[in-house]
Amino acid sequence: MIATLYLVLFFLQAMHIDWDELCLGGLGAVGACVFTNPLEVIKVRIQLQGELQARGQYMVHYRNVLHAFLRMAKKESITSLQKGLLPAFCYQFIMNGCRFGAYQTFDNNGFFRNSNGDIILPKSIIAR
């Protein structure tokens, strides 16, 4: 993951850096995080229930995703579904902002296109 970030930054130094694209990519990822973070919270809660006890020896708090969602919203408040949102925003902004922004910057500089302006599929796939 760190190596990918270094590689992206190396290529961005070699060409014109389009900071608008990097920021827009990061903001898009942050916007999506608002909707996916509750699912991550529920997933972790389900995975960790009874983690420190023997199989069959623990109380099942959440039977499935819908049950966990309803139980958390009812017992802890609806805001409990967004726990850890700020670190998730930072992670998404940095990782996906670099990825989406770098891809668009490369595309704007013609890295993925031939002389006719058509997309070169192998280069585009490798960049994704």
Image (cartoon, rainbow, N blue to C red):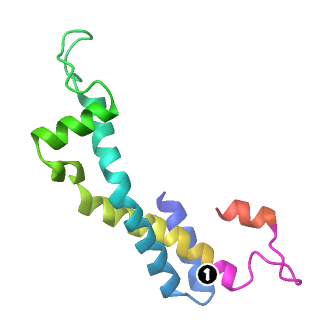
6 drawn magenta? no
Q: Which residue is at 23% across, 48% downward? A: 81
86 left or right of 91 in image:
left
Other-residue count near label 1 (Cα within 10 Å), few / some / many at <14 / 14–19 / ≥20: many
Question: What span is colored magenta in the figure?
Answer: 106-120
Q: Amino acid at mark 1?
A: Thr
Residue 10 vs 66, above or below: the answer is: below
Q: Which residue is at 72% across, 60% downward? A: 125
Q: Nearer the viewer, residue 80 or 91?
A: 80
Q: Nearer the viewer, residue 110 or 41?
A: 41
Q: In the image, residue 8 lies at what x, y percent?
A: 56, 72
Q: Which residue is at 74% across, 83% downward? A: 110
117 drawn magenta? yes
Q: In the image, residue 93 lies at what x, y percent?
A: 39, 69
Q: Secondary structure at mark 1?
A: helix
The number of numbered badges drawn on the structure is: 1
Question: From the image, which quarter does the C terminus lie in?
Answer: bottom right
53 left or right of 6 in image:
left
| Residue at the outermost bottom position | 16
Residue that carries the numbered disc 1 in the rendered image = 105
Q: Main secondary structure of the magenta part?
A: loop
Q: In the image, residue 21 lies at what x, y percent?
A: 52, 82
| Residue at the outermost top position | 56
Q: In the image, residue 87 lies at what x, y percent?
A: 27, 60
16 left or right of 113 in image:
left
Q: Nearer the viewer, residue 115 or 5?
A: 115
117 left or right of 111 in image:
right
Q: Quadrant of residue 56?
A: top left
Q: Which residue is at 29% across, 40% downward? A: 42
